[in-house]
Amino acid sequence: MVDAIADPDSGLGYNIFRYNIGGGDQPGHNHLTKGDGGGAVPGYKPTENGAYDWTADQSQRNILFALNKKVKNPIYEAFSNSPPWWMTNSGCVAGGVNGADNLKSDYFDDFADYLSEVALHFKKEWGITFRTVEPFNEPSAGWWKSNGDQEGCGFKNNQSGMIEELGKALKKKGLFPEMTYAT
């Protein structure tokens, strides 16, 4: 698969890749079924007070590492479909009740810290530097509803506040300007 995607002679020759920093849903939720369960992306911090689990999301990381070996001068873009479940209003990474904004209002800085900590770990421990880190994906769509079939988070309000918090977190960890925060 990596050759089909990245080989410039026998494949597509892609050199820009997106990596989904998963939120990880609440234990016991079994509704993330899109793509035969592929909508369930493990998060790196499964509980608010627990430690980071750097063994999470091994399948997606293995593809990223294989691409990193194959591609000359790859560009990596990190994005997030949802904050971890415990940062959400609904307690679910698929979205808010009736598609409402789902990040708790006092967790903007916590979510920024989560994203920047994952980006820092990828850089320091695995040699992967993301060019950009996006705190949301399709934030104004309105279809991200709790108990849906994939991760998503409504962010109709205060997108600029989230971007500011992410910028502060990237700067604090010495990742900016090498990594920028994208919208």
Image (cartoon, helix red, strand yellow):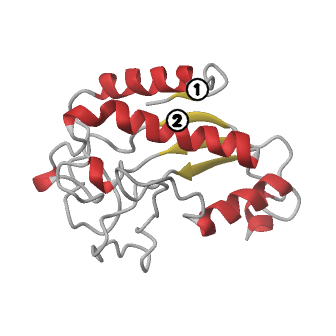
Q: Is residue 12 visible?
A: no
- Front residue of 175 and 15: 175
Numbered mark located on residue 173 in the image:
1
Judging by the rendered image, the residue that carries numbered circle 2 is 116
- Asked whether the residues under the numbered discs 1 and 2 touch, taking CB atoms below 8 Å apart as contact, a structural biologist would say yes
Q: Amino acid at mark 1?
A: Lys
Vertical order, 62 against 107 (above or below):
below
- How far across and down, in percent of the image, does residue 125 sit? 72, 46
Q: Residues within 10 Å of mark 2 (few under 14, many from 20)?
A: many
Task: Report helix, strand or loop for mark 1.
Answer: loop
Identify the residue at the far bottom of this view: 36
Q: Is residue 93 visible?
A: yes
Q: Quadrant of the N terminus?
A: bottom right
Q: Tell me the residue at 84%/56% (across/down).
A: 69
Q: Is residue 61 left or right of residue 46?
A: right
Q: Residues within 10 Å of mark 1 (few under 14, many from 20)?
A: few
